[in-house]
Image (cartoon, rainbow, N blue to C red):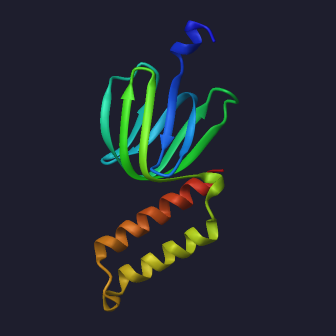
């Protein structure tokens, strides 16, 4: 790859404690940060941050396709030409069981709306956000 092509790419790594999901060259990355989404392009200023819950998207240099990964919290490190995502939980869109994610979302909504079940409202909201992020990623594939 030429120096000019390298200047237009980022090395992206996405991993969880269990496995590595991505290690490839990309043209851009959009990451769910703790306080909203962040777009990262080659040459980005160095950054350390907390991840939120949402869908990480990136465009692969190898085939130009946009890819989607459901991310549930963790850490982000950005260097000039490198993005490292260390997520607590992450799933590629094609790995997500849509029916199971829909059932989890419905269950979390019911638990959150019914205080008699004794579920912590904060836990129910977190479960809803995780299920929603999984569905959003899966529906993009």
Q: Position of residue 126 (x, y in %)?
A: 36, 66
Q: Residue furthest top?
A: 3
Q: Residue furthest bottom?
A: 116
Q: What is the tally of numbered marks visible in this picture?
A: 0
Please name the residue shown 43% across and 35% down the image: 84
Q: Quadrant of the N terminus?
A: top right
Q: Residue at x 51, y 32 (%)?
A: 12
Describe residue 137's horizontal placement relative to residue 32 as left or right: right
Residue shown at the point (44%, 31%) measured from the top left: 83
84 displayed left or right of 22: left
Image: 52 above or below 1: below
- Left or right: 123, with 141 as reference point: left
Seen in the image, is 83 located left or right of residue 115?
Answer: right
Return the x and y of residue 25 as percentages of the image width and height: 58, 26
Q: Nearer the viewer, residue 62 or 132?
A: 62
Indicate the position of residue 38 as horizontal and vertical percent values. 39, 38
Q: Residue furthest front?
A: 18
Q: Name which residue lies at 33% across and 82% down.
A: 119
User: Which image quadrant for residue 98?
Assistant: bottom right
Q: Position of residue 23 (x, y in %)?
A: 56, 34
């Amino acid at each position: 790859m030429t120096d000019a092509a390298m200047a237009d790419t980022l090395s992206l790594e996405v991993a969880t404690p269990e496995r590595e999901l991505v290690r490839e060259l990309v043209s851009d990355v959009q990451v769910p940060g703790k306080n909203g989404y962040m777009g990262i392009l080659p040459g980005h200023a160095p950054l350390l941050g907390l991840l939120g819950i949402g869908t990480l998207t990136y465009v692969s240099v190898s085939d130009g396709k946009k890819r989607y990964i459901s991310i549930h919290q963790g850490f982000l490190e950005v260097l000039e030409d490198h993005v490292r995502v260390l997520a607590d939980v992450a799933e590629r869109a094609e790995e997500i069981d849509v029916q199971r994610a829909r059932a989890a979302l419905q269950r979390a909504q019911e638990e959150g709306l019914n205080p008699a079940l004794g579920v912590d409202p904060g836990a129910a909201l977190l479960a809803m956000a995780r299920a929603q992020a999984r569905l959003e990623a899966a529906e993009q594939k």
